[in-house]
Image (tube, coloured by chain):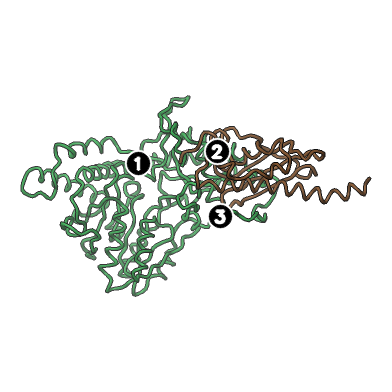
Chain colours: A brown, B green
Amino acid sequence: MAYSDKVLDHYSNPRNVGSLDKASTDVGTGLVGAPECGDVMKLQIKVNPDTNVIEDAKFKTFGCGSAIASSSLATEWVKGKTVDEALSIKNMDIVKELALPPVKIHCSVLAEDAIRAAISDWKKKQESTKPAEVSAK
Amino acid sequence: MSTDVKTHEQRTSANGIKLPIYMDNHATTPMDPRVLEEMLPYFMEKFGNAASRNHPFGWAAEEAVELGRERIAKLIGATTKEIIFTSGATESDNLAIKGVAEMYREKGNHIITAVTEHKAVLDTCKRLEKYGYRVTYLPVQKDGLVDLDDLKRAIDDKTILVTIMAANNEIGVLQPWREIGKLCRERGVLFHTDGVQAVGKVPIDVTKDNIDLMSITAHKIYGPKGVGALYVRRKNPRVQVSPIIDGGGHERGMRSGTLNVPGIVGLGKACAIATEDMAQESCKLAGLRNRLKDKIMGRLDEVYINGTMEHRLPGNLNISFAYVEGESLLMGINDIAVSSGSACTSATLEPSYVLKALGTGDDLAHSSIRFGIGRFNTEAEVDYVADRVCETVERLRELSPLYEMAKEGVDLKSVKWAAESH
């Protein structure tokens, strides 16, 4: 099947490849998919604790070109958004932007899942660290 | 597979190699110019119908068809009357299996095949199951080969046919067809083999190897598409198949339909070239294949060969590149035509059933690439392919969370992966 130019571009020049320190309290990590299914995405966000703005995002993806492009695009889109704004990104937005064919829609679903998983990991960290901060004060 | 329009344009690499490179010779082969040359007169000047018995146009066509028959027979150790022309291997497989099933229905209703067969065999067997036939699908061992003891045990007094391919189209492994033929002969069971990938590549002799029926196609041996043959044994024992296409009674009633004369001329010429060149060519192909394997394995860690290297087509290499998904790898090497066992490259979105049958995990099945080296590939092309594949795997591993986790010492098998949404 033919890939859209945008998929080819993200595949050839993926944005924000890499890893953030997953132990940091400001970092949320989402790991979704499974190797047996042919795609695994790791998406990480670094959130400013005062503004809740996602200041940095990184990804690594095992999967087809569309999966790589979907996660690359997801990191671009979440950067600069607040956590709540990032949660409003829907898989169909990714499908539209990358012109994914129907058989590749699951790649976009996985990217949305990855964003949600990263945010939920970050939120969990905030809940578990807040009481500690209070008692330290 | 990626078929970006740009890949259809001919380009030339820095070191003068014509791109894209074709290395998918198990899917189909380019025609040998010598084959085309012999075919050409049979489209316009010698266009006759081989069944026209009363004028020179028909005679010329018939003569050409008979030469084709002779050349095929010579390559596989058969006689000319044992060659039935068809439209290709799928039809040959259907004719062999359905034809025997119907003809020998009173003798029994049991057929034995293997799980790694081509769909033309598996789906034909599945259809027969609907009509009341019993089919045993033999498993294969880790190396891709059928266990002869399994086969021995599977044969019972209702078994009429064993159908096991000579060479596998994905992993190129050569089943022990001579031993299977001997066993079937001893037990009085007919033996059909799908010889599509093996004929013309490795020596296969229906007489010495006790093969009763064999499917052949032209387009895997540098001949044209749309023409094939079925070998049907005439004596010791005399094998009969019920036709699946009814009509004018061509091919001794087994396959009606006007013969594809130019196609048959091409198939015959392709067989004649193979008879002549096979020994030398298989050495060349094995040399190129081993060069590719050594270059890749010398540079990359965690690459795994699928299927035995010991009993294998000389031009085949099937490798899994751990932590890299096959379709993304194909996308990165889009100036090279190969194929992958990845789900993303199949219509069914399932990874290769052949690799799964070997016990290869789904993760490695998704990571597999099949290289099919053929007559027209060169050493320079092999070197280019090896470099491009290694570069791309390295780049994609940098992008792979699995590779990162493995390098950190995480046991990927012990990770509880998030539930899949598809």
Query: What's the CA distance linking mark 2 and mark 1?
Result: 35 Å
Spot occupied by residue B135 in the image (x, y as percentages of width and height):
38, 67
Mark 3 burial class by Cα count in 10 Å: few <14, some 14-19, many 20+: some
Mark 1 burial class by Cα count in 10 Å: few <14, some 14-19, many 20+: many
Residue visible at 46% across and 55% down in the picture = B354
Give a yes or no on whether discs 2 and 1 share a subunit. no
Mark 2 burial class by Cα count in 10 Å: few <14, some 14-19, many 20+: many
Quick one: SS at disc 2? Answer: helix
Q: Chain of mark 1?
A: B
**Residue underneath mark 3:** B361
Please state which of the two labelled residues, at mark 3 or mark 2, is closer to the viewer.
2
Q: Picture quarter containing residue A22?
A: top right
Question: Does residue A89 appear to the left or right of B284 in the view shown?
Answer: right
Q: Which mark is residue A98?
A: 2
Q: Does residue B379 appear in the picture of this structure?
A: no
Observer-nearest of B269 and A98: A98
Spot occupied by residue B244 in the image (x, y as percentages of width and height):
25, 60
**C-beta proximity under 8 Å, tags 1 and 3:** no
Q: Earlier in the sequence, mark 1 or mark 3?
A: 1
Q: Amino acid at mark 3?
A: Gly
Quick one: SS at disc 1? Answer: loop
**Residue underneath mark 1:** B29
Q: Amino acid at mark 1?
A: Thr
Q: Amino acid at mark 2?
A: Leu
Q: Chain of mark 3?
A: B
Residue visible at 76% across and 41% down in the picture = A21
Query: What's the CA distance linking mark 3 and mark 2?
Result: 31 Å
Q: Does residue B238 appear in the picture of this structure?
A: yes
Spot occupied by residue A69 in the image (x, y as percentages of width and height):
58, 39
**C-beta proximity under 8 Å, tags 2 and 1:** no
Question: Does residue B305 appear to the left or right of B416 in the view shown?
Answer: left
